[in-house]
C-alpha cells in the first residue's frame, strides 16, 4: 500500500508541476546558475544506485551562465532527462552535459532576438527511434513496459521550458544515443 500511495503522490505532483505557471521571485524573473544547478543534479543522482555505473561529463563554455528559469525547475528538467538516460542505458554509460551561450537566439514559436543559453544533454544509450521522436513530449506517452514511469517526465520538461520562455527539443541528427537540447533565455543580471 505504501508504494502505491507513493506512486499516486508522484503522479499528482507531476500533474501539478505540468500545469504550474512560471514563477517570479521578488518581482523579478527567477534565475538559475547553470553550473550550480548541474552540480546539484549530479550530486543528487550519484547518491542513487541507478547511477553507480553512469559517468557524467560536464563542459561549460563560460564560468558564469545564468538563465531565466527558477533553479528548482531547471533541476527538475535535468533530473528527468538524466533518469531517462540512465534507464535507457540500463544504468551503465555516459551522460554529457554541455552548456554554451547563443547570441540573438530566435525561437521557432515567436520572434525573440535575445542571448540565450543552450544545454545539450547527451547519452550513449540506444537512442530514440525516428518514428517516436515526434511523440516523446506527449503527456502519458511511454514505451516502457516495466512500469518505470507513466510518460509525464518529458511532457513536464517541455512545460517547464516553455513557461520560462525557452524550449526543449530532440536533436534528431545525433545518432549515437539520444541528445536533448534545452534553450533558455540568458539572464541580464550578470551581463
Image (cartoon, grey):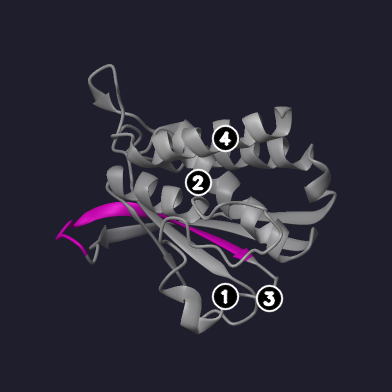
- Give the residue at mark 3: 126
- Label for residue 77? 2
Which quadrant does the N terminus fall into? top right
Quick one: label 4, few (<14), some, or many (20+) residues within 10 Å? Answer: few
Look at discs 1 and 4 and give the one toward the viewer.
4
Q: Earlier in the sequence, mark 4 or mark 3?
A: 4
Q: Which residue ends up furthest to the top in the rendered image?
A: 26
- Residue at 40% x, 32% y is 70
Instruction: Kindly check if marks 3 and 1 are in contact, taking CB atoms under 8 A apart as contact.
Output: no
Q: Which residues are magenta?
A: 109-122
- Residue at 55% x, 68% y is 179
- Label for residue 128? 1
Q: Which residue ends up furthest to the left in the rendered image?
A: 111
- Give the residue at mark 4: 8
Q: Position of residue 146 (x, y in %)?
A: 71, 59
Query: 9 and 177: which one is in front?
Result: 9
- 81 is within the stretch colored magenta: no
Q: Position of residue 50 (x, y in %)?
A: 79, 49
- 114 is within the stretch colored magenta: yes
Quick one: label 1, few (<14), some, or many (20+) residues within 10 Å? Answer: some
Left or right of 181 in this view: 10: right
Task: Give the spatial CA distance, label 3 vs label 1.
Answer: 7 Å
Look at discs 4 and 3 and give the one toward the viewer.
4
Q: Earlier in the sequence, mark 2 or mark 1?
A: 2
Left or right of 186 in this view: 81: right
Residue 71 versus residue 159 in the image, above or below? above
Task: Give the spatial CA distance, label 2 vs label 1.
Answer: 18 Å
Q: Earlier in the sequence, mark 1 or mark 4?
A: 4
Amino acid at each position: 500500500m505504501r508504494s502505491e500511495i507513493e506512486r499516486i503522490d508522484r503522479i499528482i505532483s507531476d500533474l501539478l508541476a505540468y500545469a504550474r505557471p512560471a514563477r517570479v521571485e521578488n518581482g523579478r524573473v527567477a534565475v538559475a546558475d547553470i553550473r550550480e544547478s548541474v552540480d546539484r543534479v549530479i550530486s543528487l543522482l550519484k547518491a542513487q544506485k541507478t547511477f553507480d555505473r553512469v559517468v557524467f561529463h560536464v563542459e561549460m563554455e563560460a564560468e558564469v551562465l545564468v538563465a531565466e528559469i527558477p533553479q528548482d525547475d531547471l533541476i527538475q528538467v535535468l533530473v528527468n532527462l538524466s533518469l531517462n538516460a540512465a534507464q535507457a542505458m540500463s544504468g551503465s554509460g555516459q551522460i554529457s552535459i554541455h552548456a554554451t551561450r547563443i547570441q540573438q537566439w530566435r525561437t521557432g514559436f515567436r520572434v525573440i532576438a535575445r542571448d540565450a543559453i543552450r544545454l545539450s544533454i547527451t547519452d550513449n544509450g540506444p537512442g530514440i527511434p525516428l518514428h517516436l521522436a515526434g511523440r516523446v513530449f506527449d503527456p502519458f506517452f511511454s514505451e516502457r513496459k516495466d512500469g518505470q514511469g507513466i510518460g509525464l517526465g518529458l511532457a513536464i520538461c517541455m512545460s517547464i521550458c516553455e513557461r520560462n520562455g525557452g524550449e526543449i527539443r530532440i536533436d534528431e541528427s545525433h545518432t549515437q544515443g539520444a541528445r536533448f537540447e534545452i534553450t533558455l533565455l540568458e539572464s541580464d543580471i550578470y551581463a
